[in-house]
Amino acid sequence: MRIEQAIEYADQLLYDQTGRHLSDLQSYIIQQSWQGRTYGQVASLAGYSEGHVKDVAAQLWQLLSSALGERITKGNLRSRLINRIKRTLKKASSANFLSHPQSACNLDFIGRDQSLAKLHTLCLQQSIVLIQGEGGLGKTALARHYCQQFPLLLELSIARETNHISSVESVVEEWLYHHFNQPPGKDFGISLSRLKAQLERHKNSVVLIDNLEPALGGSGQFVLAHRRYVDLLGMLLTTKTTTVITSRDCLCEPSLKVHHYRLPSLSLSTWEQFFGACLKQTQKQPNPYTTLKAMHQAYSGNAKAMEILRTAVIEEFAGDLGAYWQGNKKDLLNRADLRNLISHQADRLQNLDPVGYSVFCRLGSDHMQTQLLNQQLSADFISELMWDVPPERQRRVLNSLCDRSILTLQKGLYRLSPVAIAEAVRRSRQPKCYSTG
């Protein structure tokens, strides 16, 4: 049972109960409590006072107790959630839509055998591999699946908000204590040396840094408050330890040799396997495969979108794929969970690169939409939208949009996914979207 499953389950429980998702701190408290940390340790790692952490935790246990109908405490959290998740999965597996033979596959890691083999090859050749792609593509699932083969895993999940990211000093300290029973040094350099010595003794080890982009600034470098992460990665480069990073953004630190692996989207055949019994041909649904092909194209084979859509088709339309698509195909982002796949990237682009954000909005203007769908665009074509951007800066804007997984570039041509187009259209209608000043 992975901690991520427990956090996702608790998040859904909280949302069903209150209409709100887990906060970053609440998620962190669950994660650290799951691993047996004290409130004092949680407070130290998260950068809050112990009193504040206890108050937030007490409220969280009360909310979960109410949602589950049984008393939840820090001590029984793990066992209670594991039991509930197992019961939920067992119930789901006996439902009609999972009785189809196609659904017996491993749905947590479907369609990624080739990507796993590619990642394995890259990690044999490169010390640091960064898996890059848009939200919901399956970067974390692939990284965790790869890393589970190693007997020693040092893991760090970057907080979603920059001001909640753990300092690298506290991360190294935690790794030394937790994995090697070693105290940190009096300064960070000594701590790094001790960590390096331990890693060299444990030859078959891996470091996983998940969701790196909140620690990166507009240029793809670590923000000032977290520049010492460069020192950590630099040290890891000198060992035989494999380092896997996931990020929506490129990491562009001149002193670090990082190989970027752009994770491809899932194939149509994978979607067909995942949807299973939803593709059963009926009188009401004569061409389900044609419908699924349109959905796959609209969401660019995104893994998270695939999960969201199948759940909606099953729970809201009794497995009728055609009925779902007929009612939803004109608004690809009508659901909040689907909208979140692209909105975070667009928000980040707006904060870090206002000029690039303006160009993104212009791509969503009314006269552009028919030209964008299923089309690959040349740099010159997009440059026509940058009339107020100096020519020498236009290529930088295109690179910025690619580095943040907004545009994709293949063989010199650019493409904006239908979901990104829908978000660009929505934002293009907001005031002050077009200004690059």
Image (tube, rainbow, N blue to C red):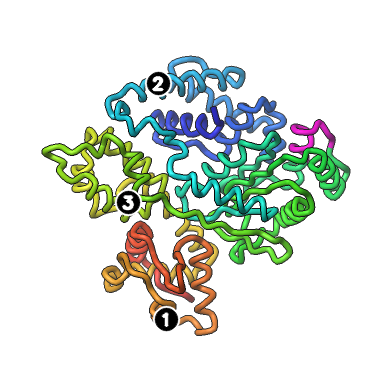
- Residue drawn at x 70%, y 36% is 152
Alpha carbon distance from label 3 to label 1: 29 Å
Residue 181 lies within the magenta run: yes
- Residue drawn at x 49%, y 67% is 401
**Local crowd at mark 1 within 10 Å, few (<14), some, or many (≥20)?**
few
What stretch of residues is rendered in magenta? Answer: 173-183
- Residue drawn at x 55%, y 35% is 27
Dot 2 amino acid type: Lys
Residue 382 in which image quadrant: bottom left
Which of the numbered marks, if any, corresponds to residue 90? 2
Q: Is residue 83 left or right of residue 51?
A: left
Q: Could you say where residue 245 lies in the image, as x and y percent from the top left?
A: 62, 50
Dot 1 amino acid type: Asp
Q: Is residue 230 left or right of residue 19?
A: right
Label 2 sits on a secondary structure element that is helix
Q: Is residue 52 left or right of residue 288?
A: right
Which part of the image, by quadrant, shows the N terminus?
A: top right
Q: Is residue 336 visible?
A: no
Nearest-to-viewer mark from 3 and 1: 3
**Local crowd at mark 2 within 10 Å, few (<14), some, or many (≥20)?**
few
Which of the numbered marks, if any, corresponds to residue 380? 1
What secondary structure predominates along the stretch shown in magenta? helix
